[in-house]
Amino acid sequence: MLRDCESVVATYATDVLVLGAGSAGCVIAARLSEDPGTQVAVIEAGPAAWREPWIRIPAGFARLYASGKYDWRFHTEAEPGLDGRSIHWPRGKVVGGSGAVNGLVFLRGSPRDYDRWAQSGARGWAYDDVLPFFKRMESWDGPPSEERGQDGPIHAAEARHVSTGAQAFIESALAMGYKRVTDFNGAWHEGAGPMQMNVRKGVRSHSGDMYLWPARNRANLKIMPDRPIRRLLFDGPRCVGALVKRPAGLERWEARREVVLSAGAIGTPQILMLSGIGDGAHLQAMGIPVQHHSPGVGQNLQDHFLQRMRYRTKPCGTVNELWNHPLGKLRMAARYAYDRRGPMSIGAAEANFFARVLPGAEEPDMQYLFVNFTVTTYDVGPDAHPGFMFSGSICRPESRGTITLRSPDPDAKPVIRANYLEAAYDQHLMVEAVKYARRIAAQVPLAALIEEELTPGPRATSDEDILAHIRRDGGTVYHPCGTARMGEDDFAPVDPQLRLKGVTGLRVADASVMPLVPSSNIQPAALMIGERAAAFLRAGA
């Protein structure tokens, strides 16, 4: 068993210790340090990278993905539902967390998502309860609305560049009878429109830059990067701090008031289990003393699953064409440098479409995202031919996975089992979603641009053929959550005030506490959780 083999070289104390400077952690540290009477320290395993250009440029997400820079480089185990494939799960290892390296899609999901949170036992987290915190965190660059914030740190706006293909995608949805959505983060509307992104004048707007950077010189705030967390520290049932790793040895960080664990949907359950909080039998098998038996830690793992529809197209201004032209990259860079527009101002998608695919669906069950290039993997880059793709993603998957320890060594990657397509509903919906995507592509605006469906391809006609292709080719939208869910039942590790049950002095605030994955993207919800956690701490709730 590996337990604290290195010596403690320094001890520090603060009022509130925030473990993880990800999307929620940056919010919490910045908000709490607004009170000069509260000493706050935030610990981050990765570097600060305040002015890394590929973080700031929206299109830089693809380069970061391919390089693995600022990435924990997690992978699932061999997935039975995906023909035994292991799926890469990039997670941000940098101040700002995954919000600093993701594709900048900025969608809250349906108001009903949060009502379902409350109905599942997270009382006080219904949409009317969380809306003020969504508004507090954002500045919406659009028409004033009762649903949107106007003076928050995170800037949100529609895509500044909408390509010919993206326009045709939106028009094809309208041709199917859907509406043009004016605000996906307003009152819930199904339909299509340009993507909303967390950008400010063409530059990524994330919690590291927009919350923590402006607060960095406050006398009561310590920002401590490059410090991987080893485990939590306890005095009886009370969490009193954490051990973190430095090249010279271990540092002991103590909290006079509270510890807030914000290490993400993978890191948080791993740290809890390394600290003796989790399923007792699993911990004992790892040789870890049980601090508190909490079998729900690491359970309830959820993620959005997607299938990409790839098309060879006529020349229509796709990134493929620019990327493979001798002067294309230079032109993209020059356009971005000139007015922060063009393809480099776009993240993972230019347009969005929420659709009801299954008969009788009460609200959209699939999200389609239009991408103005085709790629098999981001490691390789855009294909040589003109092309675009749109991805179909399940809004509310029923499959559930787990996070467990591989060993008691904090440096060992945890065991991630997503269990994609385990639920029959997910299989059925994905097959129907491919058929629905073909209906979208057959509409005149898109059909006029498309020359050939590349994947799944014309040979995949039967349900069996389509499902077989999905198992070979489908993957993640990078939205893991739910692994330390909040609720009032005994199996929920965290209560609705984000306090870890069974111990005192410890809260959890990140995507791990989500009872159910929101129906679109999880970045705004993670930021909202950070705002809510800061409010709880300031109120002493």
Image (spheres, rainbow, N blue to C red):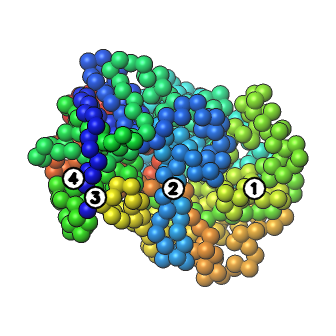
Left or right side of 306 for 3: left
**Residue 26, position as x, y percentages in the image:** 41, 34
Give the spatial CA distance, label 2 vs label 3.
Answer: 23 Å
Disc 1 packing (10 Å; few <14; some 14–19; many ≥20): many
Kindly check if marks 2 and 3 are in contact, taking CB atoms under 8 A apart as contact.
no
**What is the three-letter code of the residue carrying label 3?**
Leu
The residue under the point 52% across, 69% down is 86
Q: Nearer the viewer, mark 3 or mark 4?
A: 3
From mark 2 to mark 4, how far is it between C-alphas?
34 Å
Q: Earlier in the sequence, mark 1 or mark 2?
A: 2
Do residues under tags 3 and 1 come within 8 Å of each other at their CB atoms? no
Q: Quick one: SS at disc 4?
A: loop
Using the image as rendered, state which of residue 15 and residue 492 is in the foreground. Answer: 15
**Residue identifier under label 4:** 488
Q: Is residue 334 above or below residue 289?
A: above
Question: Residue 2, labelled with which disc?
Answer: 3
Q: Which residue is mark 1?
A: 382
Image location of residue 470, percent across then percent down = 60, 72
Could you tell me if the residues under marks 1 and 2 are in contact, i.e. CB atoms within 8 Å? no
